[in-house]
Image (cartoon, rainbow, N blue to C red):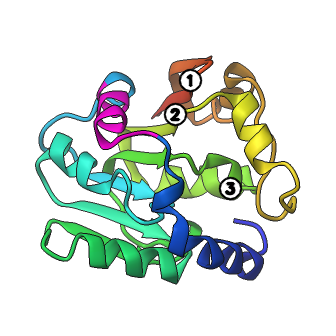
Amino acid sequence: MSNNKEMKDFFDSCAPTWDQNEEESEKDISLFLKKYLPVYKGSKVLDIACGTGIITKKLFDLSQVDVDAIDLSSKMIDIAKKKYFNYKQLHFYNQDFVSFSNTGYDFEVMFNAYPHFIDRGKLKSTLVRTLKPNGIFAILHNCSRKDLVSCHSGVSSNISRNLLPVDEEASFYLDLFSLVMADEGLDHYCILLKKK
């Protein structure tokens, strides 16, 4: 992430109302994940930029094994830990992903967070380091690219960037990843990439 302090402060300030701003129901989010994310039982999964853990427990429901989740915002992580204190299978880390030391993931998932990773080069090298061979990196948004641009208008370029069409965005990774899926529509923006 670019300018960590500005990013951290921004998301710390958003944390108290973050869950209230999620417009989709729990059921709709679960159905969305099942449709676009091929997590299988036994998969080692990392929820990148997990926020308050909106999908972390759902990833556990799919994998049936412990799930790691990471976010730069300490306030987001505090809320996630409180929400899921009964789930010892969910491990929350308050840390920048590019300095994360855990490795060996089958799936690394970003749900509604990808535009906030300004430095795609650092992101790509971290993904390559932390994913297993043939591991999947999933960029998932349950809204359109147009909605994302509208949502982030007026936000500092140190906090968010505008996304390219899915094929163009995915092409940045194709030196080290193969494309599994690139699809966008009125209610989604999804890219799945497999580490070579």
Name the residue that disc number 3 marks.
117
Q: Is residue 26 magenta?
A: yes
Q: Nearer the viewer, mark 1 or mark 3?
A: 1
Which residue type does callout 3 highlight?
A: Phe
* Mark earlier in primary sequence (1, 3): 3
- Above or below, 124 against 159 in this view is above
Residue that appears at 42% across and 73% down: 101
* Mark earlier in primary sequence (3, 2): 3
Residue that appears at 39% across and 55% down: 47
Q: Position of residue 166 (x, y in %)?
A: 67, 24
Residue that appears at 68% across and 55% down: 117
**Left or right for 100, reference 155:** left
Q: Secondary structure at mark 3?
A: loop
Q: Is residue 186 magenta?
A: no
Q: Nearer the viewer, residue 172 or 61?
A: 61
Q: Nearer the viewer, residue 141 or 186?
A: 186
How far apart are the two marked residues, 3 and 2, measured between alpha carbons? 18 Å
Q: Which residue range is magenta in the image?
A: 24-34
**Left or right for 156, reference 113:** right
